[in-house]
Amino acid sequence: MRKKCFALLLALCCLLACAAAEPADAVLMDFSELAGVPTHYLYYDRDYYDAPCEQAGEVIRVKYTTAMYDKEYKKFLNVYLPFGYDENGTERYPVLYFFHGRGCDPDTLIRNDATKNAFDHMIALGITRPFILVTATYYFGRGTNYDPELFLREMREEIMPLVEGSYRTYAETADDAGFRASRDFRAISGFSMGSGVTWTLLPNMTDYCRTFLPFSGAFGELESFAPVMGNPELPVFIYMASGGPEDGASVGCGELARSVAADPRFSYGTDPSVNSFYYVMSDNIHQDLTSRYYLYNAFVDGVLWPAADAE
């Protein structure tokens, strides 16, 4: 009897293990009526994605000193490297720069276990190609000092050369020529105040970056970024996202999305080859860690970088 019970228990454990081997299908949520524009949001299986992944990437802390401000300041950033990354290999990786919200820091997103696990799973399942994620801060000194003009210089002259001169991004040289040639494989994103940083960088970074993903923050005024959207030589795609009514940023994001959708200078939709703007509305709260859900949606929608066979 004991042997039969043990066998049944073993079979049940195996069944449960097999059930957990793949995630449940994502749930499609539609808040178009509330947003005032066509939108969709995929809610993934958090029990699966947020759990540890066998094909785990690593996170490296990189310290540096910035000379952009009134004096030198010591800072750090995090670099997430996907499973199988080989610094001596031939493969190159697209890179995403992410900026945190107010009161947070470069550790908030990627040093969160569930977030890192989710990115590991997304890559392992082929939802996105392997990529490098950089989490940096726009603050300098003590507190929350932020200078948009000087941070733009820090980004272009210090952060990007440091990262892309050390890791295998698509920039074959970590300089102006290399960054311009690889702009299709570079994205900038941020949450809340980091969304504001993303909007501020946008008009001044289109030579180095094609895709911008501001989350839970409609800091961009239409006329501040519209002039850079119609250049066929430097196409730009904006993928904005927010939570629902419990995310105070959703009101401003909805207003901006409706303005953009009605403006003939833009093309609303999820195909970067023909569209320039899309808005994802969810039911999430206002919290930095929800960014992993929005990035999942961006990967599934295929808006971040060309497919591997399209290089």
Image (tube, rainbow, N blue to C red):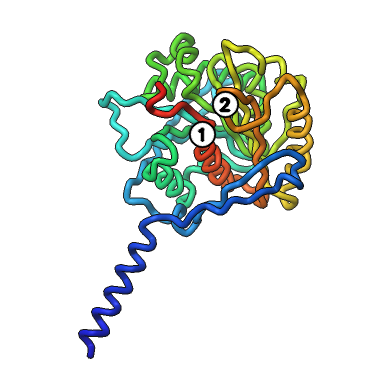
Label 2 crowding class (10 Å Cα cut-off): few <14, some 14-19, many 20+?
A: many
* Residue 181 in picture, x, y percent from top left: 46, 13
**Residue tagged 1:** 302
**Residue tagged 2:** 272
- In space, the residues marked 2 and 1 are separated at their CA atoms by 8 Å
* Residue 234 in picture, x, y percent from top left: 58, 14
* Residue 162 in picture, x, y percent from top left: 44, 22
The secondary structure type at the circle numbered 2 is loop
Q: Is residue 149 left or right of residue 57?
A: right
The reply to whether callout 2 and callout 1 are in contact (CB within 8 Å) is: yes
Quarter occupied by the C terminus: top left
- Determine the residue positioned at 63% across, 12% down: 231
Task: Examine the rendered structure and indicate whether residue 4 appears above or below residue 139.
Answer: below
- Determine the residue positioned at 54% across, 26% down: 73
Q: Is residue 276 visible?
A: yes
The secondary structure type at the circle numbered 1 is loop
